[in-house]
Amino acid sequence: MTKEEKPVPLTKLPDVCVRCATCMAACPVSRVTPRFPGPKQAGPGAQRFRSAAEASVDDWIDLCTGCRLCDTVCPAGVPISEMNMMAKAKYLDERGRTFRDWLLVRSDLFGEMAARYSKIVNPLLKKKVVRWLLDALLRIDRRRALPAYEHPTFRRWFRTRQAPKGGGPEVAYFYGCFTNTNETDVGKAAVEILEAHGLKVVVPPQRCCGIPRLGVGDLRRAREMGRRNVDFLLRTVRGLDIVFSSTSCGLMLRHEYGPLLHLPGAEELARRLFDICEYLLGLHEEGKPAATFQPIPLKAAYFAPCHLRSLDIGLPALELLRRVPGLDVSLVEAECCGLGGLYGFKKEKFAIAEEIGKDLTEAIARMKPDIILTDCEGCRMQIRHLTGLKVLHPVQLLRDALERQGEEIHRVPVESFNYLG
Amino acid sequence: MDLQTEVLIIGGGATGTGIARDLSLRGIPSLLVEKGDFTSGASGRNQGLLHSGGRYAVNDPDAARECIAENRILRRIAPHCIEPTDGLFVSLPEDGPEYRANFIRACGAAGIDTLPLSPREALAMEPRLSPRIIGAVQVPDGAIDPFTLVVENARDAESRGARILIHTEVTGLIRDGLRIAGVRVRDRITAEAFAIAATWVINATGAWANHILRMAGLQIGLALSKGSMLITNTRLSERVLNRCRPPASGDIIVPNDTVSILGTTSLRAEDPEHYEVTPAEVTFLVDELSRMIPDLKGERFTRAYAGVRPLLQSEGTNDDRTISRGFALIDHGSCSGPAGLVTITGGKLMTYRLMAEKTADFICERMGLHVPCSTHVQRLPGAGHGHTLKDRLLRLRRQTPAAKGEILCDCELVPREAVDAILREGKVRELQDILHRTRLAKGTCQGGFCVYRLLGLLNERSKADHRGGSNRILKGFLEERWKGIRPVLWGRSLKEEELIESIYKGLFNLTPAEPGGPGGGEA
Ligand SMILES: Cc1cc2nc3c(=O)[nH]c(=O)nc-3n(C[C@H](O)[C@H](O)[C@H](O)COP(=O)(O)OP(=O)(O)OC[C@H]3O[C@@H](n4cnc5c(N)ncnc54)[C@H](O)[C@@H]3O)c2cc1C
Ligand code: SF4
Ligand code: SF4
């Protein structure tokens, strides 16, 4: 990939594109629907036809999931997904966003509340009539299971738990909204595995990273949220590294705060942000004190999320998993799960998300795994939805594989995750 | 095959096809012969500026008045060939405020609307302009698509009874005593030669006017001036940008469809056929125009090309810019030449309709007919068809083969259907003919990625298997393409060019064309 010396303005990106069409082969959306013309055409191609002064006509831009697979293959280094995002932002600014989008991107705000009343909320979300209403009124597809809320939240658990004694170097943890209110066990596992590596975990104040806002092209609010996070986290990174367990939050923090949102301090932050498995693998490779794993005799399939590919750090989770004795883990040969964050919940996009996911479903069916592992909560939701199988974050399995002093029972992977089917 | 007609027109540029249309509207039969395709002369090699007349207002008020009148007419009869962008006459400090004041006054006198703008206003409208500007004046300039304009003049003329033969070259004039009684022609593709008898022969060959006249031992005072232009990959501005100073070289940027055209130079040429864009011209244009748009140097250019203007000589001038850009209609019979031969040359694309009107008026008068001209009110056939960038972008919506929306040229979004329609019409004979009638190969990759798709389509319709087939056509095309690309091959264009070259040479195993086979083949 060739990097231009100074960032090329968006309107000049068609000059950078060499028209090779490599990106067209990578795009999961154009593969399944003729309604989306693909990255080359929707991005640098369409840009030559756009005028800043006039209203947009390319409504198909809303079909780009922002998976960024195109960016990862472009030999000229065109930030295609970013172009699409800007175009989408302009289009939606002109057309206006729906109430549903307004609501969905605020899930971080009502998440805490929903978690507190999860006993009431969860059964409600399961009810056919509620799902039917959401579908009819908000166009949130009723065939898509909604994630359940958990109480207490990860944050509360962390605050009220009995922290292990002893020192060790500190590391900060960015857990992300979904871990906090819907998948607390991922957070717990992250903390445990970090501690098992001799680290002391701190949880700095943090907000939603803002990536859902990007999905609806709301750059202004994404920037606002980012600014707050940078303020919180900069204080932390001036002394500590930060690890994240959610790939998409991590991508947002590490790659979008700077290049896309131009937040001051973003670069300093990015330098000390790490994917949790990337970080742990580093410890193992550098010969730092690391945990050892006991055998887990399972057949596992590991799926690499799109946003992990964008992070450009290889597949650290897979490498770590390979260090677990007895675990027969192999990579799922499929490109994209299709969910695209909130994208696949939207009624008008449900079919596209399903269709993209077919490859993945078939690949998994061929592998016949006992369990599926993947770093991104969106992918986990989608794979559960598509296959009905158990899907965990790699750190959950690693946590279960930890060799513990004095612990006899061989723990099988957690059942803790309650998912509304 | 020998043919016969009332009026024979030589030259299928804007002027020739304009005359054919004008005559057909007056019910006078004509036959037009063009040695290449319609826009192979200056009509396909100009800057595409729909002049408001502003450029001529100070120095040549008559030309200015002519321009603004035709400007208004063309907007009415050919709205689909015109982008009503407006234009700015931009003053830099070195241009001074005096010319600007004169300019506004002279435009007023010629009937050209002006809107003076402060530097701030102008920069808000065109952010890429130099912050050094001291002011700007808005005028009703625009961009014109000469390809569609010419092809539709021809189509309309044909539908009203005119006959047109393209790829047919006049090789001699037939004399009958003191009259010219017709022409000898040769089909450039089949090499077939034949004669066409005519009562009137109109020489509308622009820069080639003296080539035809020499066949009758005649000559007129005509200087040839080569003008070179550069095309950028994207539009630089929304409006035409002119320097507010006496007309000179390198002072106009015309937004045209997806691109901008930078021009021009003005250099004496000897021959209307063989010329090229020199590196010095490229450097000059980029340097000179970056005074208006400072970051021009980093721009990606996709092509350089040139055209030759016929300039009517008047005595004692050396600078081609001061030679009249007006046109001349010469009845050779009335100036000691043979009767029945008329030459119409000079002028501008802007004035093609007026030139055609004057020529047809003359013919009518000589024929004793009193039919008034109606080309200033009769709209061209395609008028009303959407042609904006937005409309074209929307083609992406139905791009599946099943929906007949397969896109052949990705850069310019030319659907297969557009080429199919042209082929169905059955009038095109060469690859270039197709390229003149669509924007195929006019975008970023300059046909590097789409012409082979087009050849695939031609093969399917077994149009490409004469004279060496698609390989020969492809090589011919690539050679032509190379001529246009070579002068601007640096930076980002270079990267793509390397890729294209490696595809043709490394993957397709295409070897350089055999000598003696230039140009496209029969399509
Ligand atoms: C560099 C440049 C920039 C210009 N920019 C502008 C502009 O921005 N705006 C504007 O209004 N005008 C512009 N012009 C002027 C404009 O392009 C011409 O005035 C106009 O196109 C002339 O049209 P035409 O039909 O008279 O000549 P042409 O288009 O040259 O047509 C003559 C035709 O005669 C054919 N021919 C020649 N010999 C024979 C033969 N023996 N047998 C059969 N056919 C023959 C040729 O193939 C050719 O197609 C520009 C010109 C140049 C060169
Ligand atoms: S971001 Fe993903 S969906 Fe969007 S154009 Fe790129 S590859 Fe396609
Ligand atoms: S991969 Fe990059 S260079 Fe190639 S067509 Fe796509 S955007 Fe252009």
Image (cartoon, rainbow, N blue to C red):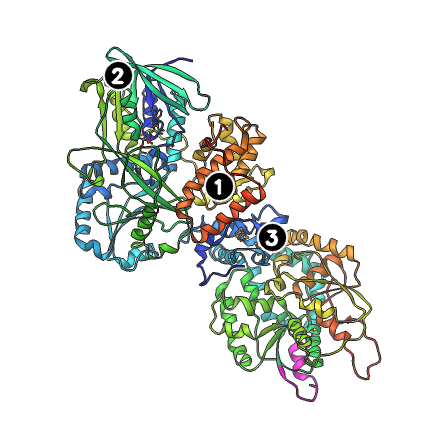
Label 3, label 1: how far apart the Cα atoms are: 24 Å
Q: What is the magenta segment's predominant secondary structure?
A: loop
Residue assigned mark 2: B340
Residue pictured at 18% horizontal, 50% vertical = B99
Q: Chain of mark 1?
A: B
Residue assigned mark 3: A27
Residue B376 visible? The answer is no
Residue A171 in the image: state x and y as whole percent.
Answer: 62, 80
Of all residues, the one furthest to the left in this rendering is B316
Report the magenta residues as a range: A148-170
Residue B3 in the image: state x and y as whole percent.
Answer: 39, 14
Q: Chain of mark 2?
A: B
Is the shortest distance between ligand 2 and the CB of mark 3 under 8 Å?
Answer: yes
- Amino acid bearing label 3: Cys
Name which quarter of the figure residue B39 lies in.
top left
Of all residues, the one furthest to the front in this rendering is B515
Label 2, label 1: how far apart the Cα atoms are: 44 Å
